[in-house]
Image (spheres, helix red, strand yellow):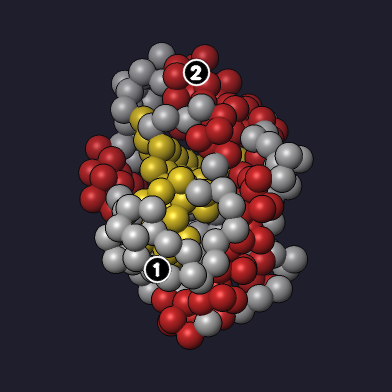
Amino acid sequence: MIDAPLKRLLQGLRPDTGLVILTGAGISRESGLHTFRDIDGIWAQVRLEEVATPQAFARDPARVQGFYNARRRAVLDPTVRPNAAHEALVRLEQGWRGPFLLVTQNVDDLHGRTGSSRLLHMHGELLKIRCADCDRVTPFEDDLDTGAICPDCGAIGTLRPHIVWFGEMPLFMDKIGEALADTGLFIAIGTSGTVYPAAGFAAEARANGAVTLEINMAETGGRFDAGLYGPATQTVPTLVDFLLKEVR
């Protein structure tokens, strides 16, 4: 529910205000995908140092490929579908009159599958692979093994998940920085706010004069102007309905 202080904060926005949205694993949880940092999350089951760093891939590529093969299969499970929060963000993108950018930390394809088009995957995409030799990115939905041949350059054993591992630079940082510099409203949805550089986006937007809003199951302790708490499938559609109706 949108309380009175939040209503006043949002109603003060211009209809052509720039909008940047950051989503994290929390928005996909209700679609059936595990988050990373919850008590039952992925990093509670396996150490990130063993599967999500360049050093891990160099040391044991078969284990890393196996980990991402399992995650790829999970995303492709027929029971995993976009939810009401993903759908609401498509409505917002289509109805918002100002500049709009959706940045996701998620490596699943649920935003794109729903129809989001002004979308950047800053941590890569699980349903794509990249060649370490020619750097070409290719859509891919099968299991990947260590002896796979690059379809572009023919190199053997150079293919890896198109995922930004710990210690690597996230993608599209220049474009994200430009959008944060011009935005009047920044919304973080379903993200723990602990992994940089994404954890600094709210402060960056706020320093440039933007209103900052957190949507999550509970407060994360981040410095936001306001928060909306509860399941994403309830809070995000509620917020989108309000923005499209009241910011005019």
Tell me what residue is drawn at x 69 percent, y 56 percent. Answer: 34
* Mark 2 surroundings within 10 Å by alpha-carbon count, few (fewer than 14), some (14 through 19), many (20 or more): some
Image height of 217 relative to 130, above or below: above
**Residue highlighted by disc 1:** 156
- The front one of 12 and 153 is 153
- The front one of 229 and 109 is 109
User: Disc 1 versus disc 2: distance between alpha carbons?
Assistant: 51 Å
Tell me what residue is drawn at x 68 percent, y 37 percent. Answer: 81
Q: Amino acid at mark 1?
A: Ile
**Left or right of residue 44, residue 181 in this image:** left
Tell me what residue is drawn at x 30 percent, y 50 percent. Answer: 172
Q: Toward which corner of the image does residue 83 lie, by quadrant?
A: top right
On residue 73, which mark appears?
Answer: none
Q: Toward which corner of the image does residue 197 lie, by quadrant?
A: bottom left
Viewport quadrant of the N terminus:
top right
Residue 170 position in % (x across, y down): 36, 59
Does the image show residue 99?
Answer: yes
**Residue highlighted by disc 2:** 244
Question: Which element carries disc 1, helix, strand or loop?
Answer: loop
